Image: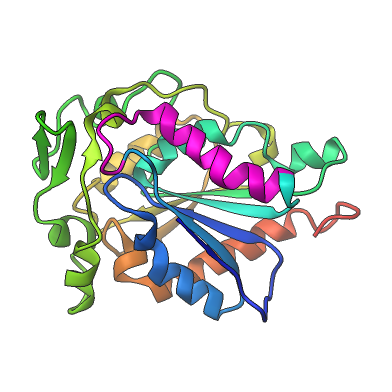
């Protein structure tokens, strides 16, 4: 996990980049660096289910809250754009409870999540599992090793960042690790992305060259969520923060400005 700040900031909002399964927080460094270069404050984090056979979704919920949302929002009063990559949508959908800025403003509190970004993300309903949401079978690129309690990735370069050029592709693939089996089969807790506070503040980014989570599956997630999303489309692989960080940074900056604008008429905020 990393904390990154900028001196010539164009925004007081913190963009919190949460890597999904198989990725550690440093996988977000390329994107984070570009955002900071453009004047945006960022934080990056990985989840405890990476390289930890004993971790479930509940453990990942806890780490998002205790290591990032509580310090940033409750302790520092920061406004946050929450960027959830792939599996991170599972714990992220639960971790956001009570952190929406619109809800906190109504209580006279500072800071909060001003917008949600699900990039190729799982959008669960309570009780659903990762494995169940993809049809009940592991993918052909999964290497499930019961002895270690982890799932590894066959050919991570092709699966996650096939559109990256060398030497970036090889470097990006080196940042892919095992992910706990338990995180794929444990049920999601209650979810809060449907809260009214996020109306007009939910974005889903589809990745149309995705070899890990097919675009049709991503579209299914959005449709079955039964809630409105603003849709963005990228012709990239599953992990564009590795393969196309400049393009993704520009899109993330636009989304951040748009989220900020939804609060411009509220007195005393932004």
The percent coordinates of residue 43 (x first, y second) are 53, 59
Q: In the drawing, does residue 153 fall left or right of residue 255? A: left
Instruction: State the predominant SS element of the stretch in magenta.
Output: helix
Q: Classify 171 as above or below 125.
A: below
Q: Does 55 lie within the magenta span?
A: yes
Residue at x 86% of width, y 51% of height = 266
In what quadrant of the picture does the N terminus appear?
A: bottom left
> Is residue 163 visible to us here?
yes
Residue at x 73% of width, y 54% of height = 262
Q: Classify 235 as above or below 213.
A: below
The percent coordinates of residue 18 (x first, y second) are 45, 51
> Is residue 200 visible to us here?
no
The percent coordinates of residue 41 (x first, y second) are 61, 67
Q: Nearer the viewer, residue 184 or 199?
A: 184
Residue at x 19% of width, y 63% of height = 173
Q: Which residues are magenta?
A: 50-74
In the figure, residue 96 lies in which quadrant? top right
Residue at x 33% of width, y 43% of height = 218
Q: Nearer the viewer, residue 226 or 97?
A: 97
In what quadrant of the picture does the C terminus appear?
A: bottom right
């Amino acid at each position: 996990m990393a904390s990154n700040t900028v001196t010539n900031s164009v925004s007081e909002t913190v963009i919190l980049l949460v890597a999904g399964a198989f990725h550690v927080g440093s996988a977000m460094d390329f994107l984070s660096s570009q955002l900071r270069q453009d004047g945006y404050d960022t934080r990056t984090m990985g989840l405890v289910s990476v390289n930890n056979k004993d971790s479930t979704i509940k453990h990942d919920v806890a780490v998002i809250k205790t290591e990032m949302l509580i310090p940033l929002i409750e302790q520092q009063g920061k406004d946050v754009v929450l960027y959830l990559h792939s599996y991170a949508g599972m714990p992220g959908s639960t971790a956001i409870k009570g952190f929406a800025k619109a809800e906190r403003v109504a209580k006279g509190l500072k800071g909060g999540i001003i917008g949600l970004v699900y990039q190729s993300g799982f959008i669960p309903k309570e009780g659903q599992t990762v494995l169940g949401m993809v049809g009940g079978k592991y993918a052909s690129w999964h290497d499930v090793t019961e002895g270690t309690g982890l799932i590894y990735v066959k050919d991570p370069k092709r699966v996650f960042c096939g559109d990256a050029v060398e030497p970036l592709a090889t470097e990006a693939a080196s940042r892919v690790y095992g992910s706990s089996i338990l995180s794929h089969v444990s049920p999601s807790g209650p979810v809060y992305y449907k809260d009214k506070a996020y109306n007009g503040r939910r974005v889903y980014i589809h990745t149309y060259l995705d070899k890990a989570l097919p675009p049709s599956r991503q579209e299914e997630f959005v449709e079955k969520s039964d809630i409105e999303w603003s849709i963005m489309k990228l012709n990239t692989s599953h992990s564009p923060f590795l393969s196309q960080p400049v393009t993704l940074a520009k899109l993330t900056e636009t989304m951040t400005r748009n989220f900020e604008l939804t609060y411009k008429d509220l007195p005393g905020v932004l």
